[in-house]
C-alpha cells in the first residue's frame, strides 16, 4: 500500500470516510468493478480515518463503518 503525504483536492475530492479534504497523508483505495486491464479507479482515503480489523478464522482484513 502506497501512502502520499498530501491530499489532492483536484475536482473537489473528499475522503469517503470523514467527507473532508484535509491536507493529511492518504492512501489510494481501489474501487471494485472499475478494473480494466492492469488499472483500477481509486479514491483517496485519509490514513488516520482507516481502522482495519483482521478476522483471523476467515482470513479477512476489513474495516467496519
Image (cartoon, rainbow, N blue to C red):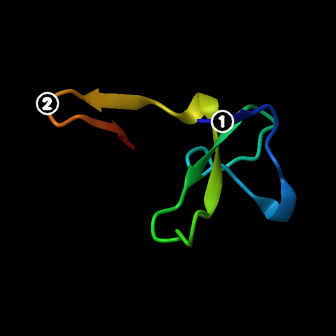
Alpha carbon separation for disc pair 2 and 1: 27 Å
Query: From the viewer's perspective, is 15 left or right of 12?
Result: left
Where is 21 relative to 40, above or below? above
Query: From the viewer's perspective, is 41 left or right of 50?
Result: right
Residue 56: name its quadrant.
Answer: top left
Quickly name the residue at label 2.
Answer: 57
Where is 22 relative to 32, above or below? above
For the image shown, how many numbered marks are present on the structure?
Answer: 2
Residue drawn at x 14%, y 30% is 57
Mark 1 nearby-residue class (10 Å; few <14, some 14–19, many ≥20): few
Residue drawn at x 39%, y 44% is 65
Quickly name the residue at label 1.
Answer: 2
Residue 52: name its quadrant.
Answer: top left
| Quadrant of the rendering where the N terminus is positioned | top right
Q: Mark 1 falls on what kind of element?
A: loop
Nearest to the observer: residue 61 or residue 45: 61
Residue drawn at x 52%, y 34% is 50
| Mark drawn on residue 38 | none
Nearest to the observer: residue 14 or residue 55: 55
Amino acid at each position: 500500500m502506497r501512502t502520499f503525504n498530501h491530499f489532492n483536492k483536484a475536482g473537489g475530492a473528499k475522503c469517503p470516510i470523514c467527507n473532508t479534504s484535509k491536507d493529511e497523508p492518504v492512501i489510494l483505495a481501489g474501487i471494485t468493478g472499475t478494473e480494466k486491464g492492469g488499472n483500477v479507479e481509486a479514491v483517496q482515503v485519509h490514513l488516520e480515518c482507516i481502522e482495519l480489523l483482521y478476522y483471523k478464522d476467515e482470513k479477512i482484513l476489513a474495516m467496519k463503518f
